[in-house]
Amino acid sequence: MQTSASGVKRVIFAFTALAIALTSVAPALALDLPQSFINLSKSPTLHDPGILVVDPATGETIYSNEPDKTRAPASVLKLISMTTALKSYGADKVFTTTINTTGKSSVYVLSGERDPWITASRFEEKKYHRSYGPYLINKVLIAHPHLRFMTLYYKDVYTQDVTNLQRFFKGRIKIVAHPISSGAADALIRKPLATIKSPPLKDIIKFTLLWSDNTIADRLAHSSAHQDGLPTDVSGLQSVFEKTLKELNVPAEGLLVQDGNGLSHQTRVSVRTITSLLVEIKKNPDLKVIYDGLPTAGETGTLKSRFVKDAPSAVGLVKAKTGWIDTTVSLAGFVTVGENQYAFTFIADRIINRESARTAARETIDKMLATIAKPGPTGTPSPAPTIP
């Protein structure tokens, strides 16, 4: 069959028009949110929350609600604290604490590096391999078994840890403790008697994120300020957090810091700041320890019992930092949708101060993520057969 010249021109024109039409269509969103996600976001259980969902690969915003309004974040603030500690110290930092002899058998110097991992609990030492403070005093008592009174000078050791030692040995030996400057300590010290060490900081960070340990998070935040030559008060926390976020090009407008763990109702941060940090965590290999430390929905840490009943389809598909205080319920992390992961932050900070209201808010957030969570490809394709 022959085609006329005019027919060929019409075919070419049709294909050209189709090509132009296809190239002029706006690209589809990386993730098409179901209406159920949007409906749940407006649920009264959340009371107009801050929400931001972003594609880390492109930076594209998938969904947002008041992303720049600052809110009380609860424990999702620990994402900033742990990132700051990682930046200040490095992942392999090991904290050491040493008890040192002086010229008198009843006087000792406890010198440390602001180790956040020290405990006086034998249970915590055995189960979590915490640095065991009483070990140091026991070494003194082995050397001087009849000692009943000790003067203990200490530097760069948390006062609470010294108080815990006094309580632990009460009735066996009286410990009178005094803080001391580095110069004065160096003048007193004769030689080290015993030392305890923490695991690498990366392991402490993973533990802190997995179980949302408030004490360790707050200590690491203050220690990071000290490490960077800043005051260890609220102003130092504000400065060191701002420094960390600026170095990572994370927007921090409106950030107001009162502690390192998010327990203060006066702390303020936007979901844009938290989500932008998550995007940086996802793409920066130096911050992988933060991602690795996040609990997994229905499986580990503070998310072990979440999603199991209210949103079972998302079990194993969400890695996120939980958070709550009286009137805030928050969640920030990553949701797997097929071959992709999306960063998200929810901060609902107008919750009624009742556990039933907080539970309802958590369930709504879980259900929202379950509307989009999908497992990725299972396994790998079988290799092609070898042809002789």
Image (cartoon, helix red, strand yellow):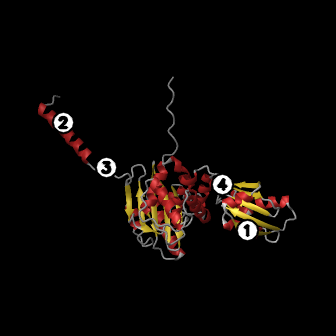
In the rendered image, the vertical position of residue 26 relative to residue 159, given as above or below: above
Q: Which mark is residue 27?
A: 3
Residue at the image point whose x is 58% and y is 60% from the top: 226
Is residue 211 toward the left or the right of residue 258 in the image? right
Q: Residues within 10 Å of mark 2 (few under 14, many from 20)?
A: few
Amino acid, disc 1? Ala
User: Marks 2 and 4, Cα distance to the nearest angstrom?
Assistant: 73 Å
Disc number lying in front (3 or 2)? 3
Marks 1 and 2, the one that precedes in the sequence: 2
Disc number lying in front (1 or 3)? 1
Residue 214 in percent (x, y) is at 59, 65
Nearer to the camera, 120 or 379: 120
Which residue ends up furthest to the top in the rendered image? Answer: 388
Amino acid, disc 4? Phe
Q: Kindly state the secondary structure of the residue where label 2 is placed.
A: helix
Marks 2 and 4, the one that precedes in the sequence: 2
Q: Quadrant of residue 108?
A: bottom right
- The residue where tag 2 is placed is 12
Disc number lying in front (2 or 4)? 4
| Contact check, label 2 and label 4, Cβ < 8 Å | no
Residue at the image point whose x is 47% and y is 48% from the top: 283
Is residue 53 toward the left or the right of residue 5 in the image? right
Q: Which mark is residue 177?
A: 1
User: Marks 4 and 3, Cα distance to the nearest angstrom?
Assistant: 51 Å
Which residue ends up furthest to the bottom in the rendered image? Answer: 353
- The residue where tag 4 is placed is 95
Marks 4 and 3, the one that precedes in the sequence: 3
Residue 303 in percent (x, y) is at 56, 61
